[in-house]
Image (tube, rainbow, N blue to C red):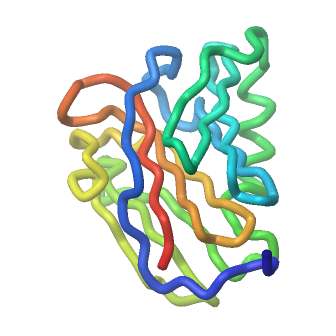
């Protein structure tokens, strides 16, 4: 697998609830493995789970007792960019509403999705992460169709 891909568009690959995720900004993180086959999802509720990309399955808790805010601090500095920093995923707001996720490639915004585009309620995008190659962008938030905290996995093409 190349260090980074050549992506110009991202669409929703999967969306699911996570009963262990907290409803608060930056208290969830997603870390994608190098082969981009698994995503570790961690939450301030001290729960670590595995999401398998190919089968779209979420495991039960792998570990309880994780200190998520230590991961979040690391994610703010590392996991929002692809491995060579070609791609950047940014959660941002208009006024006081966290309602946008943008993907930047080589310093140019190539995709912006609103909370509605992602299937989240108003002001409900909680966190964003990006895979090493930039292929997958993961966002957490309050899902509009269920009212529960969950995840959206975007895939690049």
Q: Is residue 81 above or below residue 62?
A: below
Tell me the quarter of the image containing the N terminus: bottom right
- Is 48 on the left or on the right of 93, as rendered? right
- Give residue 105's quadrant in the image: bottom right
Q: Position of residue 12 (x, y in %)?
A: 36, 58
Marker count (numbered):
0
- Residue sitting at the far front: 55
Q: Position of residue 135 (x, y in %)?
A: 59, 69
Q: Residue at x 53, y 43 (%)?
A: 55
Q: Position of residue 65 (x, y in %)?
A: 77, 10
Q: Residue at x 78, y 20 (%)?
A: 67
Q: Is residue 75 above or below residue 58?
A: below
Along the line of sight, the residue nearer the viewer: 142 or 95: 142
- Is 63 on the left or on the right of 143, as rendered? right
Q: Residue at x 33, y 65 (%)?
A: 113
Q: Residue at x 64, y 42 (%)?
A: 30
Along the line of sight, the residue nearer the viewer: 70 or 155: 155
Q: Is residue 98 above or below residue 149?
A: below
């Amino acid at each position: 697998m190349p260090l980074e891909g050549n992506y110009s568009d991202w669409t929703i690959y999967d969306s699911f609830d996570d009963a262990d995720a907290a409803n608060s900004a930056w208290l969830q993180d997603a870390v994608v493995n190098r082969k981009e086959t698994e995503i570790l999802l961690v939450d301030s509720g001290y729960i670590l789970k595995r999401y398998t990309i190919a089968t779209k399955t979420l495991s039960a808790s792998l570990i309880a007792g994780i200190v998520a805010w230590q991961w979040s601090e690391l994610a703010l500095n590392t996991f929002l960019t692809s491995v060579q920093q070609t791609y950047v995923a940014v959660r941002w707001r208009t006024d006081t509403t966290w309602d946008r996720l943008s993907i930047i490639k080589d310093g140019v915004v190539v995709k912006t999705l609103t909370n509605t585009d992602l299937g989240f309620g108003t002001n409900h995008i909680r966190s964003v992460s990006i895979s090493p190659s930039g292929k997958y962008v993961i966002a957490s938030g309050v899902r509009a169709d269920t009212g529960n905290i969950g995840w959206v996995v975007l895939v690049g093409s």
